[in-house]
Amino acid sequence: MKINPVNILKEHSLKHTKQRVRVLEEIALDTVAISQPELEKKLGKEIDRVTLYRILNIYEDKGILHRIMDMNGTANYAICSSSCSEEHHHDEHVHFNCTSCSKIYCLDVTVPKMVMPHGFKAVSMNTTAYGICEKCNLLVKEN
Amino acid sequence: MKINPVNILKEHSLKHTKQRVRVLEEIALDTVAISQPELEKKLGKEIDRVTLYRILNIYEDKGILHRIMDMNGTANYAICSSSCSEEHHHDEHVHFNCTSCSKIYCLDVTVPKMVMPHGFKAVSMNTTAYGICEKCNLLVKEN
DNA sequence: TTAAGTGCAAAATCTTTGCAAATGT
DNA sequence: ACATTTGCAAAGATTTTGCACTTAA
């Protein structure tokens, strides 16, 4: 699917500034989620740290980006599938957090339904697998 | 199962200090994971903030405690089941993070096996359900 | 006795807030 | 023109580091 930052901003009635467009462009470059520190490194020259915080927050609130916390408590961001909305994030797919390169992948694997104990009402589910990703597996074999 | 802080420390050849014992006691009080800020609040008079950081890190490294990150990137701690070791945490049960009281429960629900895409080797799995816990559900009904 | 652990001070980060200047509609 | 957004400065919070003093083995 093609990502068009300008359209996304229009759809959510957000003003389109060059900073907001850049953030979406950068995150859309990869299907892999990107961490906030990585984003800062890449955009630091163009966008102020504080502005980045604010843009990411707005995008998450609006359901444009999807935030995944990694094992260190660092925020990682990926573009939400179109079914996400301001009311509810549909994150029912499995994430894969590579322990070698620390990238987070959004896998095309659905989280199976699980029965909750009596009294517990689950609204959403987040499943993360930790291990070695495709690329890092290849690197190991090559050496 | 009965938790004996002194024995746990011995088993992992850690010196037993009153601070280390207190941390284990406090965490063992509940099956629910406790957040680091909550621990600070409860133990702040007895244990220095920095010491708490250091003790929690050691406990996680040794496989004594099990760290669960909540949606805010805050660390929560629970006693590991006996099968955890320094080499590997067995966290294959489902966590339940209450969006109302923000407690994290370790549920007696096992994460179903999921097939990873080709090239991805999962070593461990972390599944967290978000929703309303038993206690908060009851509170709503009462009012 | 002596290696390890603790507390305090301080540095390094990370995150939020306030406000004047710049920008988009 | 006017409401929003941005960047900078600064406050607040979290986490790490260094070192002298204390404690457990």
Image (tube, coloured by chain):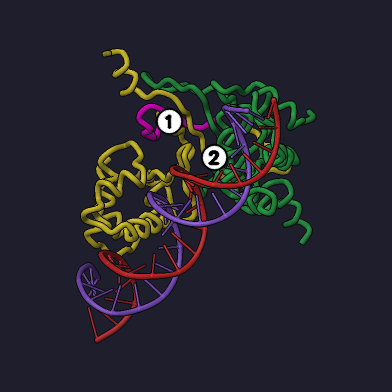
Chain colours: A yellow, B green, C purple, D red
Quarter occupied by the C terminus of chain A: top left
Residue at the (33%, 63%) spot, across then down = A13
Q: Which mark is residue A96?
A: 1
Q: Is residue A104 magenta?
A: yes
Of helix, strand and loop, which one carries label 2?
Answer: strand
| Image coords of residue D12 (percent x, y) | 50, 65
Q: Tell how many labels.
A: 2
Q: Find the distance from the CA under tag 1 to the CA under tag 2.
A: 14 Å
Question: On the picture, is B66 further left or further right than B6?
Answer: left
Which range is magenta? A99-112
Near mark 2 (Cα within 10 A), the count class, few <14, some 14-19 or many ≥20, is many
Q: Residue A125 bears which disc, if any?
A: 2
Local packing at callout 1 (Cα closer than 10 Å; few below 14, some 14-19, many 20+) is: many
* Spot occupied by residue A121 in the image (x, y as percentages of width and height): 65, 44
Q: Are marks 1 and 2 in contact (CB under 8 Å)?
A: no
**Is A134 drawn above or below residue A103 in the view shown?**
above
Looking at this view, is A46 or A9 the one in front?
A46
Q: Is residue A52 above or below residue B134?
A: below
The stretch drawn in magenta includes residue A22: no
Image location (x, y in percent) of residue A58 = 39, 59
Secondary structure at numbered mark 1: strand
Q: Residue at x 75, y 56 (%)?
A: B139
Residue at image point 28% right, 52% down: A23
B75 or A5: nearer the viewer: B75
Quadrant occupied by the N terminus of chain A = top left
Between marks 1 and 2 in the image, the one whose residue lies nearer the viewer: 1
Q: Tell which subunit mark 1 falls on.
A: A
